[in-house]
Image (spheres, grey):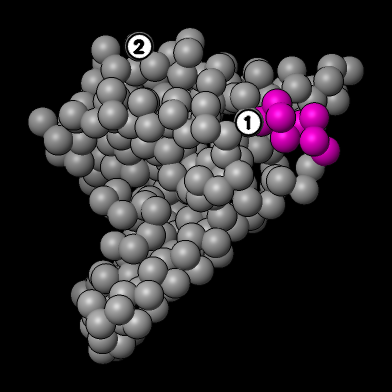
Amino acid sequence: MAAAEKPPSADAPRDDQGRAPPLHVAIVMDGNGRWAKQRGLPRSLGHRAGVEALKRTVSAAAKLGVGSLTVFGFSTENWSRPAAEVAELMALPKRYFETDLARLHREGVRVRVIGRRDGLSNDLLKLIDDARERTKDNTAFNLNIAFNYGGQADITDAARRFAEDVAAGLRSPGDLDEALFGSLLATAGTPPPDLIVRPSGEQRLSNFLLWEAAYAELVFQDVLWPDYGEEHLKAALAEFAARDRRYGAIVADDVLAAG
């Protein structure tokens, strides 16, 4: 069964109309540094604790009936951090895949890393490509890791690709519409997120999925990412289930009520 068709589990929270949780949840994994600071630990240990939170959250998402999970691991702006911290962040995918990829593959998770490849080491690129190739036929669950990713950068890259196609005579300016532009983004092939969650108490997108977030519901939670787990995701899904999503439209009852 394809991930988009995966039925929600019995544990998945539903609203009073029986609606299932969102098929695609995106999470800004934020708060590793503050978590470490609160404990008098180096920031590197906060990032490592964040990897453990990712493992818990991926397992919880699948259990709760989510079909796709996109997480924000390293942004195009994170290069401005101290070199030692950047090196630690660059090592996180290796740490995650070495300790969890076999289980992810065994459980039918399809893994994809999205974002710019510029600046990543050859070893890291090979790791990313191997994870994608190894899991490409899995259909139980989709895990997208946004790494060296920025929403503005991705939109810019997509616009450049379209302009290059026009210059090469492969397309004309009139070909461009929302669907075509979406197919040029790094997230092509994944439906837009239904829900974007940001822990850590911050209330902003921070350049995450800017195009794709057009009609996503936003939930902000006051928990630092290394402490994140099933109970927090379940709470976010319950809040989502209580929302009335209209996508810019109105329902017939509202029209009648307005006279």
Front-most of 39 and 253? 39
Please report the residue visible at 48 percent of the width from the left and 60 percent of the height from the top. Answer: 154
Name which residue lies at 38% across and 60% down. Answer: 185
Residue at the disc numbered 2:
103
Is 134 contained in the magenta span? no
Amino acid type, callout 1: Met
Which quarter of the image is occupied by the N terminus? top left
Q: Quadrant of residue 250?
A: bottom left
Dot 1 alpha-carbon crowd within 10 angstroms: few under 14, some 14 to 19, many 20 or more: some
Q: Quadrant of residue 107?
A: top left
Amino acid at dot 2: Arg
Specify whether 120 is left or right of 240: right
Q: CA distance from mark 2 to mark 1?
A: 22 Å
Q: Which mark is residue 237?
A: none
Mark 2 Cα within 10 Å, few/some/many (few <14, many 20+)? few
Residue beneath label 1, please?
90
Extreme residue toward the right, this view = 40
The residue drawn where x is 27% and y is 71% is 180
Q: State yes or no: residue 83 in magenta.
A: yes
Measured as percent of width and height from the top left, residue 118 is found at 55, 48
Q: Of tags 2 and 1, which is closer to the observer?
A: 1
Q: Is residue 191 above or below residue 103?
A: below
Among the two numbered marks 2 and 1 on one chain, the one whose residue lies closer to the N terminus: 1
| Residue 205 position (above or below residue 174) | above
Range of residues picked out in magenta: 82-89
**Does residue 213 appear left or right of residue 52 in this picture?**
left
Q: Provide the secondary structure element on which disc 2 rests.
A: helix
> Residue 222, how many percent across, how many down?
67, 37
Asked whether, in this view, residue 70 is left or right of residue 166, the answer is right
Residue 25 placement: quadrant: top left
| Residue 196 seen | yes
**Residue 156 position in % (x across, y down):** 50, 69
